[in-house]
Amino acid sequence: MKKRSPLQNAVNAHIRDHSSLYIFIIILFLMGVICGAIIVNSLSITQKEDLMYYLSRFFGQVKEGNITASYHMFKSSISHNIQYMALIWVLGISIIGLPLILILLFLKGVVIGFTVGFLVNSMGWEGFRIAVVSVLPQNIILVPLTIFITVVALALSIKMIQRIFYRQVRIPLKPIFFKYIASFVLCILLISCAGMIEAYISPVFMKQMVGLI
């Protein structure tokens, strides 16, 4: 039998220890995605036409190559995602931030569900293909990363609640905080990878896809 690496053991132990949180968070995220898709169907014809107008203008700019420079897009992507992850991370230290963490995760699902749902609802198969090349690539990294940092933040909040309200529970916080900081550093590294995909890879595929419409 092949011996597992320390990293694999650490990952397996983390998932095993927080399996119930992962199940809950994944279900909540999927509910957000479904809710976002439902919102698309509740839009009025005027609202859909307005959104489609702006989308058509954007596609026109993509065809002509008049889009934001990759470097600026990269910086914007990293800045936005780091701020989002940092907010969840900071809320994890605060007991009162626990419900806000869940709301932020749910809204992330709503945004993705609405974006994909609107493209498919308005453009059919072409919209689905555009969603695949414009939304999917970076979110292959960002969605699992969001679920991971949410679970880590919730786990810390729960441990702090146990320490404050159940005084018989004495959990050493120093090693927990060290791992918590390390988790955010890992997020920054992976966010950089997602930003490169969003800025340098997705636009290339999207330009090819839009050119076929």
Image: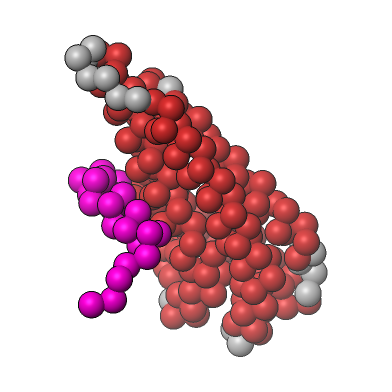
Q: Residue at x 45, y 31 (%)?
A: 177
Specify start and end residues of the magenta stretch as a single range. Answer: 1-27
User: Would you place residue 113 above or below residue 164 in this image?
Assistant: below
The quarter holding residue 51 reads bottom right
Q: Residue at x 64, y 74 (%)?
A: 201
Residue 46 visible in this rendered orientation of the protein:
no
- Our reading of the magenta stretch's main secondary structure is helix
Q: Quadrant of the N terminus?
A: bottom left
Residue 12 x/y as whole percent = 29, 57
Q: Residue at x 27, y 20 (%)?
A: 170
Residue closest to the eye, 28 or 160: 160
Residue 123 x/y as whole percent = 48, 74
User: Would you place residue 175 above or below residue 54 in this image?
Assistant: above
The quarter holding residue 50 reads bottom right
Left or right, residue 150 beside residue 69: left
Residue 126 x/y as whole percent = 50, 80
Q: Quadrant of the C terminus?
A: bottom right
User: Would you place residue 174 above or below residue 57 in this image?
Assistant: above
Residue closest to the eye, 182 or 145: 182
Q: Residue at x 51, y 38 (%)?
A: 181
Is residue 171 located in the magenta-colored stretch of the structure? no
Left or right, residue 72 beside residue 208: right
Residue 210 x/y as whole percent = 62, 79
